[in-house]
Amino acid sequence: MASGVTAPGVAGVRVPGRGVRHDLRAVKIVLHRELLRFANDRTRLVSTLFQPVLWLFVIGTGLGGLVARGPAQGVDFRTFIYPGVIAMTVITTAMFSAGSIVWDREFGFLREMLVAPVSRASIVLGKCLGGGLVATVQGCVILAMAGLVHVPYSPGLLLTLLGEMFLAAFTITAFGVSLAARMKTMQSFFGVMQMAIMPMIFLSGAVFPLAGLPGWLGALTKVNPLTYVVDPMRHAVFTHLAVSPAAARTLNPGVHWFGHRVPIGLELGIVALMGVALLGVAIAQFRRSD
Amino acid sequence: MSGADVPAIAVRGLRKNYGEVEAVRGIDVEVRQGEVFGFLGPNGAGKTTTIGMLCTLVRPTGGSAAVAGHDVVRERHEVRRNIGLVFQDPTLDGYLSAEQNLRFHAELYGVPKATVPGRIREVMEMVALWDRRDAKVLTFSGGMKRRLEIARGLLHSPRVLFLDEPTVGLDPQTRAAIWGYIDRLRRAEDITIFMTTHYMEEAEYCDRIAIIDHGEIVVVGSPEALKAGVGEDRVQIHTADDDAAIAALHERFGLPATVREGAVTFAVASGEEFVPALFARLGVPIRAVSVSRPSLDDVFMKYTGSTIRDAEAESATANWARMMARR
């Protein structure tokens, strides 16, 4: 099919047929836009950092005095919540990125994407990768604060956390996008997001250890997907700390199913699997919404 | 595939129901390649729904439509490759620069990498926005945004460009400028333009127009033909002796004439062609002559039963309702 254009100067272009290369370009540009938007928006960068910093240094310091008297003696409470705060940062940033789909719908830009001759899958994938990358970059700011809460800057630890952050961020973005696909306003999205995210963060072990909880609370933490995001991060941090075995048992008990500790690899596998499944859900949502 | 015999748009029995509401009730229309085709009608007549179906955004309830030779339901991807779209509501990312918006579009449409910078410059120069390429779109006026959207719609050299109310909400100067671009475009590029409008004076720019009302096409034709169908031209003459002129018109041409606005006034099928005969055979000296055509307003009124002013008032309400519905 020739796209004959006889405009002076430049010859007309030919839009190629459907192909993997074209879809990859679409993924790349949607991702690129996420990064551009993030880089242009300093307010967002600062505002999404505000809460984690508050947790780490205000609540962490305030509660630290109480906690220090328990069995976790010798471990700074801020060190304990540090991986939780990383997870929190990544989760909120990723949800914000996903929420921008609602913004795009409100301001019409979503239509520009949906009417393009590319698969919906590539647009959703680009969005999730972009949101994941942005949240990881945001998480790096918290990563840089490791020294302030007595966590060593070991390359192994940083790399492990980096990978875990991206995995979590991708999955959360996919969750957010599948949620945002049907939302018409930012208000309703953020309403639902608050309702879903706050309890999930509280029940994930981000701010208190999962050892010795009452039965009902323990059960809730085990079905909470975010538990499997936070635990590997905490595990990574604690393997790089010199703490007493008693403190480690209390503060980093791991997740137990029927009396057996769930291996870190399986936990990461669960998060990855959820990410892929939620990506599928998000794509299906956008395929349906014409 | 793109032979001149394939119509740019072929629509047969196209229907769209929203629940009980029949938004489009079976329309048939064919748009030739290279045509500027206007869809004219009061708001709520089904214009935007029809454009939505042709652009693969709305699934038809019945009937069929092909754009650039591709079926809008079975070959959506092919259709999308071949069309450019300018929506009524802006679809730009205000936080990106003008050029970044176009680059995004070029990547999404798979415009060959080597041609992207040149093509972006070309379309931006066409709408006189090249100087503002690095400015964020949110700093643009409504007219600049619309121009940028037109540039973007052309970036991938579509076969058919759809414009949904391209000049609505713009000031008269900007509207004229946009029509200037569209006019240059149809001469410079091998493209078919399908547009909706409710500005009567804009329908005059079209090669052909279809008037749509209550989901049905009531009439299709060139603006000239439609106006001719409504009635005759009005001819007014100033003469040395009006009574003699009236009598002569009756005797020699069989035309009834009266004095209106201080001039001898009568109606005739094609006024301009009648004028030479008038001078040759009237026998009464003529000092001045004016011929006026029936306007598209008259056409619109005849087929839809409402005036443009009513339609515009209705459209303002409908726009507001649409805005609220999107919330």
Image (cartoon, coloured by chain):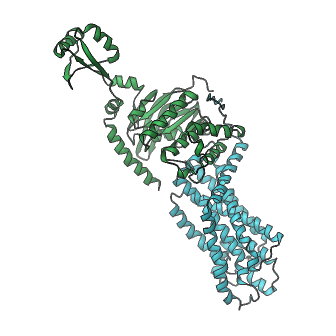
Chain colours: A cyan, B green
Percent x, y for residue A232?
Answer: 75, 72
Percent x, y for residue A46?
Answer: 62, 68
Whether residue A95 is situated above or below residue B124 in the rendered picture: below
Whether residue B162 is situated above or below residue B234 in the rendered picture: below
Is B326 placed left or right of A126 in the picture? left
Image point (47%, 56%), residue name: B327
Question: Depth check: A176 or B104 in front?
Answer: B104
Q: Is residue B270 visible?
A: no
Q: Is residue B278 visible?
A: yes
Quarter of the image with the N terminus of chain B in it: top right
Percent x, y for residue A215?
Answer: 65, 82
Is B140 placed left or right of A149 in the picture? left
Image point (63%, 58%), residue name: A40
Question: Depth check: A284 or A82 in front?
Answer: A82
Q: Residue furthest left?
A: B243
Q: How many marks?
A: 0
Residue B231 position by quadrant: top left
Question: Depth check: B319 or B14 in front?
Answer: B319
Residue B296 position by quadrant: top left
Percent x, y for residue A177?
Answer: 61, 58
Question: Depth check: A87 or A220 in front?
Answer: A87
Image point (78%, 75%), residue name: A237
